[in-house]
Amino acid sequence: MSYYNSETNKIVIFQPRECDDCPGWMIVDCGCCMGQQWVYGGECERCGGTGVLFLHKASGTYAMYPGGPLRGRECKHETNNSN
């Protein structure tokens, strides 16, 4: 879960990792403050206060838990570098 490091004055976010219990899923830091919204301080609506989301690797879909309520997809796009 993300947290604020007052010594470095930065927000610390953990790197995604494989979900050992559910092959094909990654555990991803939600980006909220340990389950709380950064600005308003209430429970994060995206992760439900857990501080983590699960990412289905094949589809790019986020969920609160593997097979659980969906929370959107990764934004993927191609860039056109030709002039």
Image (spheres, grey):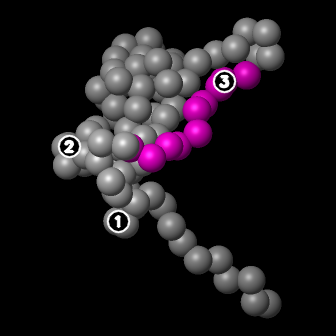
- Towards the viewer: 6 or 45: 6
Residue under the image location 58 percent in, 77 percent down: 78
Give amino acid for label 3: Ile
> Residue farthest to the top?
6
Q: Is residue 12 left or right of residue 62?
A: right
Q: What range of the chain is rendered magenta?
A: 10-19
Measuring from the top left, give residue 8's x and y in whole percent: 80, 16
Q: Amino acid at mark 2?
A: Pro
Q: CA distance from mark 2 to mark 3?
A: 27 Å
Tell me if residue 51 can be seen: yes
The quarter holding residue 42 reads top left
Instruction: Out of 62 and 19, give the one closest to the viewer.
Output: 19
What residue did someone put label 2 on?
69
Element class at badge 2: loop
Label 1 and label 2: CA atoms lie apart by 15 Å
Residue 75 against residue 45 in the figure, above or below: below
Asked if the magenta segment contains residue 61, the reply would be no
Q: Secondary structure at mark 3?
A: strand
Q: Height in image: 27 above or below 77?
A: above
**From where the camera sits, is residue 72 visible?**
no
Residue at screen point 58% across, 18% down: 3
The residue that disc 3 covers is: 11
Residue 14 shown in magenta: yes
Badge 1 element = loop
Residue underneath mark 1: 59
Extreme residue in the front direction: 20
Q: Amino acid at mark 1?
A: Ser
